[in-house]
Amino acid sequence: MGYRGSYTTVRSYVRLLRHAGAAPLRGSVPKVRQITSWMLHRSRDLTDEDRIGLKQVLAGCRHLEVIAAHVTAFAQLLTERRGENLNTWMAAVRGALRYRLAWQEHPRWGPQSKFG
């Protein structure tokens, strides 16, 4: 089993990779706590650096962008005391979930569990 090619083939391939240089460095990804903090603060209360960091994170992940929009909408419901719109907001959130998360299928946490 295993690789049946020759040593020369592997050596040539590795040589090409070495001559190509190292992969470009990616910027550091903020911690979950930092991203959550950015989402939970009003945009006007964030520093310019934080606002840019949040925009970069949201641009890189469509799911987080959707979540951030729902968080903002929920905050507006709370601050404007529009509790009568809560069911509409919940329906919008449910509609945005186009896939089932893995934990929803888990026997301990899924719909069949006492928590589901």
Image (cartoon, grey):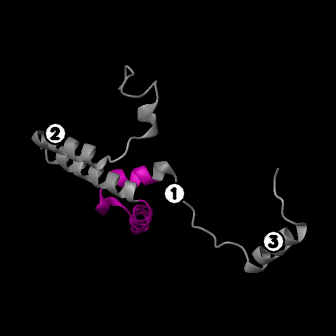
Relative to 37, residue 7 above or below: below
Q: Residue at x 22, y 51 (%)?
A: 73
Q: Amino acid at mark 2?
A: Asn
Magenta-highlighted residues: 35-61
Q: Amino acid at mark 1?
A: Pro
Which quadrant would the C terminus be assigned to in this image? top left
In the picture, measured across the screen, residue 85 lies left or right of residue 52, that is: left
Q: Using the image, tell me which numbered label, if any, was put on residue 89.
A: none
Q: Amino acid at mark 3?
A: Val
Residue at the right extreme of this rendering:
7
Residue corresponding to mark 3: 14
Residue 107 within the magenta-colored segment of the rendering: no
Relative to 61, residue 83 above or below: above
Does label 3 or label 2 sit earlier along the sequence?
A: 3
Position in image of residue 15 (x %, y %): 82, 76
Q: Using the image, tell me which numbered label, if any, was put on residue 87.
A: 2
Relative to 56, residue 83 above or below: above
Is mark 1 in CB contact (under 8 Å) with mark 2? no
In the picture, measured across the screen, residue 22 lies left or right of residue 26, that is: right
Q: Residues within 10 Å of mark 3 (few under 14, many from 20)?
A: few
Q: Nearer the viewer, mark 3 or mark 2?
A: 3
Q: Residues within 10 Å of mark 1 (few under 14, many from 20)?
A: few
Q: Viewer-proximal residue, 70 or 8?
A: 8
Marks 3 and 2, how far apart at CA:
58 Å
Q: Magenta part mainly helix, strand or loop?
A: helix
Q: Residue at x 41, y 68 (%)?
A: 52
Q: Is residue 22 visible?
A: yes
**Residue 43 position by quadrant:** bottom left
Residue corresponding to mark 1: 30
**Residue 53 position by quadrant:** bottom left
